Image: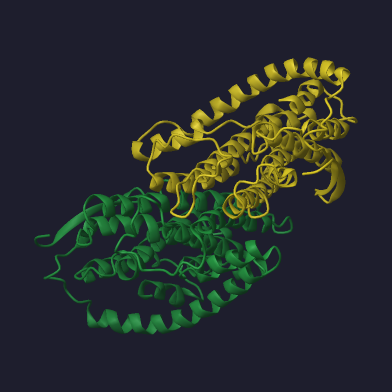
Chain colours: A yellow, B green
Amino acid sequence: MAGARAFLHHLNGNQVAVHVPSRSRASRPSSSGCRSAMVTMSQNQSYSASVNAEIEVHLKQAIPMRPPLEVFEPMNHFSFGAPRTTAPALCVAACELVGGQRDQAMAAAAALHLMRAASFTHEQLPLTDRPRPKFRPVTHHAYSPNIELLLPDAIVPFGFELLAKSDDPAQDNSERILRVMIEIARAMGSQGMVEGQYYEVERSQSEGEGLNDVGWIVDVCKKKEGGLHACGAACGAILGGGSEEEIEKLRKFGLYVGMIRGILHGVGRKEKGLETTVEELRNLALKELEEFKGGNLEAISGFVNL
Amino acid sequence: MAGARAFLHHLNGNQVAVHVPSRSRASRPSSSGCRSAMVTMSQNQSYSASVNAEIEVHLKQAIPMRPPLEVFEPMNHFSFGAPRTTAPALCVAACELVGGQRDQAMAAAAALHLMRAASFTHEQLPLTDRPRPKFRPVTHHAYSPNIELLLPDAIVPFGFELLAKSDDPAQDNSERILRVMIEIARAMGSQGMVEGQYYEVERSQSEGEGLNDVGWIVDVCKKKEGGLHACGAACGAILGGGSEEEIEKLRKFGLYVGMIRGILHGVGRKEKGLETTVEELRNLALKELEEFKGGNLEAISGFVNL
């Protein structure tokens, strides 16, 4: 790519200009930005660690190691062995930010983790016509492809079940849960995660690997990590009883946070020169939080640096 | 297998003796049974045809052919090209039998079809370690394995979305819908459809094809078609406002109906000598309907002959 250019991205219906620099002319984030980032990063790390530990406990209770072991052993393996994303913790953080209780978002956070673990396992599946795309890390296959096909097919409905079971007549939360199910279904579906995966596969088959196409990286990150985090934050806000405006602000915050993660740790991690784009996404994300107040505002702000 | 023997099957927690004959000594169903069967078969065929036509319309509205065509064209293909099962029509019939309206069960019926279409597509997926089991029909692969992997991953959440969207505050049906989601998640999951598929794959890899092992056929049919139809009937009864007793009777009816279909049209279709087992399952099924009254009792009874 020659020179810097601005991409207009339709992000949740709004056109937002994200500046995508050339490799050679990437600017560094300002030092004052770095200092404030470091403060919230440390707060966020301890917050995320405590939330993730609670999600882990919730998942371990939901997926015990029990007979039939030929089913539950690989189910445990795929559920807990998949790389962690920050979307579940963000779901909990968003719930708390709008005044909800942590346990109100726990089932949705666990479901989000399971759904992503299932889709991650299918991404690694050796298919007869598909060499592993080079931008994907090498994974060890502990099970046969058949098991890697079937178990995620079981994990996805299990995630929906977990969520449906969190319905509590005492809390009168069934409308919120049904809404969250629609959110998660869309984030994982043909215009979310699956679309991002389709972009990846299409590119890796038709034009080599396309690792240096920044526009393509941004598109994939928007659909995959962006969509997952947007969904997580929106779901947390819905379950915590946030207003429609709060839900939409947190959805956008999650989208930017997820895109940053995708660029830094996902498909864009080998691409240099995206620092300006990341910094721009950080600013856009933090702007969405401007009108929020609450005990965990500092902690949730730190998600832009994870 | 030498001689007739009775298998004790745990069917929904109840031990039910199903007589499994040897191939050589299979008895034919009684002629009076045949006559009454033919009466209800004809009624059922027109009933099923009309219900299926309505489900088709519902699905066509839910999955329009629209851009992006690279997503919606295969989604249409897999959704409408998969073999039809009777579980969705049974869902509607059970809803009507307990006094519900047809449209109350339509989203669940459509979701059931989509879930089965998705799992059917994954069954056909060419994997690097999996030759096609001989008992599965040869299917034409219109798309690449990648698409056959990804699109069903999108269809399953879409099925849940369809169901969640059928929530109607005016009907105050959200508790019923959440319950139905749990039912469908379990029927498709690791102790339902996926377990049946696992049995199939395991057998076809370890001991040739195992087509003459009647116990194995019954187990697979119970988990796959049996579980799907049990779920369909129970969901219809839940959505139609049936009592707990009615829901459980219809769940068992569905289980037997599904097992019959699995034996006659699914994995057992090449196995001769199962007429007595089928006849016994028909009797068990019809016994579950004894206390029901209603306009479509004759039509739903006919599902044992489809």
Q: Indicate the quadrant where residue B103 lies.
A: bottom right
Q: Indicate the quadrant where residue A99 lies.
A: top right
Q: Residue at x 45, y 72 (%)?
A: B300
**In front: B28, or A217?**
A217
Q: Indicate the quadrant where residue B238 lies.
A: bottom right
Query: Which part of the image, by quadrant, shows the C terminus of chain B?
Result: bottom left
Q: Give the image location of residue A17, x and y in percent.
A: 87, 44
In the image, B300: left or right of A55? Answer: left
In the image, B126: left or right of B23? Answer: right
Q: Is residue B278 visible?
A: yes
Q: Is residue A97 above or below residue A188?
A: above
**In front: B240, or A293?**
A293
Q: Residue at x 9, y 60 (%)?
A: B2
Q: Is residue A243 visible?
A: no
**In front: B306, or B251?**
B306
Q: Is residue A297 above or below residue B227?
A: above
Q: Give the image location of residue B89, x and y in percent.
A: 50, 70
In the image, B19: left or right of A269? Answer: left
Query: Which part of the image, by quadrant, shows the N terminus of chain B?
Result: bottom left
Q: Give the image location of residue B4, x and y in percent.
A: 13, 62
Q: Is residue B87 above or below residue A2?
A: below
Q: Is residue A243 above or below residue B95?
A: above
Query: How many numbered circles does the render carry?
Result: 0
Q: Residue at x 44, y 70 (%)?
A: B140
**In front: B104, or A7?**
A7
Q: Give the image location of residue A125, x and y in percent.
A: 47, 46
**Extreme-left residue of the structure:** B2
